[in-house]
């Protein structure tokens, strides 16, 4: 009987120790959600819980899987010639703000409609290197709001990440849902944040 109680107490002590260790690994300050640039006409509605950056292990498995699929689908566009062959053309000069940069937008204008394929972004984001080469740093999804709303009751999501809503005339001459995803260059502000302080136009 004495051995039975001793083994039970040891088991209980191990459970308590593991609980403390697991709790200490989860931080309430791990959110990477940052306010958008105040000069941009964009609003965001909070529906789902806060979304964390790629580096945060608390990101849900569905979103992580979608990010992996997006990387696989866009890896070929590190060669900008391949991107242009697939219908992407330069849509902007290098875009930057006090919050960081976006780089050059190469846009597939024919794909800008009310459809959403999470592996086929409407825009690719490039940064020019010091030797003049274009380096793929991220992607942007752009969905025409009126066309999407005609067939959907909710705004689009990438996994658990809600799209931003941008209104005419900035940055495009039509209302749209958009989402920047920094899958090819780390964004310390968060993988879904609009501007990346690691991207420069200089």
Image: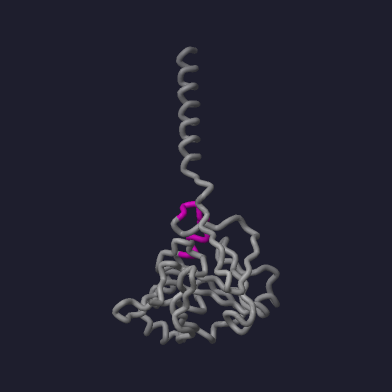
- Relative placement, left or right, of 170 versus 128 is right
Q: For residue 76, say whether it is visible.
A: no
Residue 85 x/y as whole percent: 41, 87
Name the residue nearer the viewer: 31 or 110: 31
Residue 75 x/y as whole percent: 39, 73
Residue 58 x/y as whole percent: 50, 52
169 lies above or below 158: below
Name the residue nearer the viewer: 184 or 77: 184
Q: Quadrant of residue 136?
A: bottom left
Task: Magenta stretch: give its range.
Answer: 56-67
Q: Quadrant of residue 200?
A: bottom left
Instruction: Residue at the far left: name it.
Output: 131
Which residue lies at the image location 57% right of the left edge and 73% below the top edge?
39
36 lies above or below 132: above
Residue 53 x/y as whole percent: 48, 59
Which residue lies at the image location 41% right of the left edge and 71% below the top edge?
199
Name the residue nearer the viewer: 91 or 158: 91
Q: Quadrant of the C terminus?
A: bottom left
Is residue 66 one of those drawn in magenta?
yes
Colour scheme employed for the rendering of this structure: one colour
Q: For residue 98, say whether it is visible.
A: yes
Which residue lies at the image location 37% right of the left edge and 85% below the top edge?
81
């Amino acid at each position: 009987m004495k051995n039975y109680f001793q083994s039970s107490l040891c088991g209980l002590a191990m459970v308590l120790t593991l609980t403390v260790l697991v709790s200490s690994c989860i931080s309430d300050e791990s959110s990477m959600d940052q306010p958008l640039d105040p000069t941009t006409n964009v609003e965001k509605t909070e529906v789902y819980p806060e979304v964390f950056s790629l580096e945060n292990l608390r990101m849900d498995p569905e979103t992580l899987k979608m990010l992996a699929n997006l990387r696989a689908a866009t890896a070929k566009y590190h060669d900008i010639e391949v991107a242009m062959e697939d219908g992407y053309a330069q849509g902007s000069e290098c875009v930057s703000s006090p919050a960081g940069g976006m780089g050059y937008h190469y846009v597939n204008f024919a794909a800008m409609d009310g459809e959403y394929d999470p592996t086929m972004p409407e825009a690719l984001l490039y940064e020019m290197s010091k030797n003049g080469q274009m380096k793929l740093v991220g992607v942007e999804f752009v969905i025409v709001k009126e066309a999407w709303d005609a067939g959907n009751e909710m705004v689009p999501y990438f996994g658990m990440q809600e799209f931003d809503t941008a209104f005419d005339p900035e940055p495009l001459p039509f209302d749209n849902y958009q989402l920047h995803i920094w899958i090819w260059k780390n964004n310390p502000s968060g993988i879904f944040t609009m501007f990346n302080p690691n991207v420069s136009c200089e």
